[in-house]
Image (cartoon, rainbow, N blue to C red):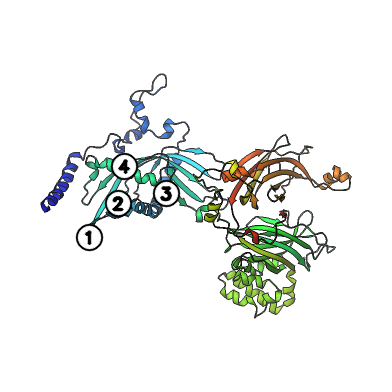
Amino acid sequence: MLATAIGLGIGAVGGISVGNILFAGKLPERDLTNFSLEADNDETVPMPPAAKDGNVQGKPRSFLPYAPAWAKHPDYDRVLWMNTVLRTMWPYYNHAIGQQTLEQTNPIIAEQLKPYPFIQAVDIEVLDLGTKPPAIGGAKTYTSSVDEAILEAPVLWGSDMRVRVAVRIKLGGYVLYLPVEVSNVQVRADARITLAPLVETLPCLGAVTISLLDPPHLDVSLSLIGGLDLLILPGIREAVHFALQKVLGDLIVYPNRMTFDIMPGGGKPPEPVGMLVVKVKSITDIHGGGDLFSKVDPFVQLSVRDGRKLSTKTVWNNKNPEYNEVLNFIVDDPKTQSLTAFLKDHDFPFHKTLGITEIPLVDADFMVNPRKVVQLDTPLFKPEAHGHLLKLSKVGAGASAASQQATASQMAGPEGADAKDAEESHDPDAKKATKDLDRLAKKDPSRYKKAEVGYLHLEVQFCPFKSAGEAAEKDPVKTKKPGERTMIRRMTRSNITSEHKGVLTVHVISASNLTTPNEHGDVDPFVELALFDPAKNETERQETSKQVNEPDPKWGEKFDFIMASATSVLNIVVYDTLGWMEGRLSLKGLTGRKETKQKIGNLRLHISEVVRNGKIRDSWALQDTQQGDITLALTWTSIQLDAESDIKAEPSNGKEADDNEE
């Protein structure tokens, strides 16, 4: 037995050594090292004669499989600049790509080795991509209806990279450590590079996803200790190729892919965690913001998500208005978001901001106790005071901040909650603001009192959503992140019912070629969105800002319709804002009522189409008009409330914020 083992060992070592000598000079016919670029760079080498009819025949045609894509496919562009940039940046990419590849590859290798218990581990110890960058053989781009850019590019890489892999094999009670070095890697592959999502904040790119359309051509040198190349031996090369194809197929060959995040979280917004139900009850004691005649026409504007403001109705000429309106807001990240309220004075041509208050969500009483209705009586402060001194809402815990804003006496004074919260706060600006506020309240109470413009009375309730996993189990409409493509079965029309709830986000991007029926040439357009929900038999309306004298307006504004049914219908109407004289000369003006808007065109969309696709972005022609179109992006996120029956008030229709403000 011992003699047999010794004989096998001596035979294996001798076979490998002799094989390297006999087959070292023999390479496969299609090996990339058989090609030389010297003739391409030598201007004295004549071009092969072309056929009279322009066709490529004979020996030149046999070289086409090795030609770059731009030379044989008209859809591909030659991208010399890209190769130049790649050569310049390669030393920096070497380290970054190598590190992230190790992080993603090692777990996959460990998963693939589970069926082989005799292999203890396969670890990549060294990964050096070398000094020679890949070459792009051309580029082909695709347009898409979602916020992404798709690029297909054949990649050629005759690299000098070096990878050392350590294989640990179990032999009874011992472990055999076998280091294997991979070098001279040659790759030819058709890669698809997806840049998604494209976002509106720098660097404007969330992540890069790479996949290979087909199994790549891959050749390597596989050496043991001492530089013995195992692939020289017959049959070994084919076995290694089979193993590499198996690993790459599970790792990066389409539909599998590798994603590299450019922004935190890949640039995708966080999943909604819940909904704020805010009842705006009233405002008391509005002062300090009246005009010449001390007349105030107040309305309240609230927001949680940036740029998603909802407004109450306007109460005319009243310093103690009552609203009793319920507005819903999506909560994405309670640690960073705040409930911000603006007191506005409805005026022409701009709405003046009289007061501001801000309530952070982190640790707020209504967040700590979900589904509990919390009464908030918070002071409103002048904008200049809020911006310079009253950063109090960002101090300490949100629960204490809410209590701090209950009365002015609680917010100021040496024994108030501010001093303690300022010490606990990690925000230096908040600490300074609180100290300034305390100092102002002590030294000049009258000046501190002048910063107030009234009190806002709210009822706030937080209704958490079920997690994405729980919602997916019970809701056949799978939750998708914006821009994400999944391989699940799409829903059919019969699957979608009014029981499916979600958040419909409408991104009003732009419109073009807008004209009015009288064709007077001046168009001041805005868009009204009206979502009719047959399950509630209600219509929720929101509006964009008004663009002045712009037949091709660009808004870029987003609107949320929360807890909408999947069977809802969205009506989009584009209006022209009429001037004072035009309104008086209209039919309504002749009857004593001023007309403020004139319809340009409309559009109706069924939300079920958005539910099936997750996201739709397109340009639609406006109806009831001779010309004009509008570009929209609609996104659907399926949600389920943790306890729907605990909502204390049904939402009323809040109007969307008007941006004509001072």
Please tell me whether mark 4 sits on a helix, a strand or a loop: helix
Instruction: Read off the residue under disc 3.
Output: 89
Q: In terms of sequence position, does the residue under pointer 2 or pointer 3 come before the other? A: 3
Q: In terms of sequence position, does the residue under pointer 2 or pointer 4 come before the other? A: 2
As drawn, the label of residue 630 is none
Q: CA distance from mark 4 to mark 3?
A: 33 Å
Instruction: Read off the residue under disc 2.
Output: 116
Q: In terms of sequence position, does the residue under pointer 4 or pointer 3 come before the other? A: 3
Instruction: Read off the residue under disc 1.
Output: 173
Q: Is residue 268 visible?
A: no
Amino acid type of disc 4?
Phe
Q: CA distance from mark 1 to mark 2?
A: 17 Å
Residue furthest to the bottom in view is 415
Amino acid type of disc 1?
Gly
Q: In terms of sequence position, does the residue under pointer 1 or pointer 3 come before the other? A: 3
x, y percent for residue 590: 88, 44
Please tell me whether mark 1 sits on a helix, a strand or a loop: loop
Amino acid type of disc 3?
Met
Instruction: Read off the residue under disc 4.
Output: 242
Label 1 or label 3, whichever lies nearer to me, is 1
x, y percent for residue 436: 65, 74
Q: Residue at x 31, y 46 (%)?
A: 160
Q: Residue at x 42, y 34 (%)?
A: 69
Q: Is residue 69 visible?
A: yes
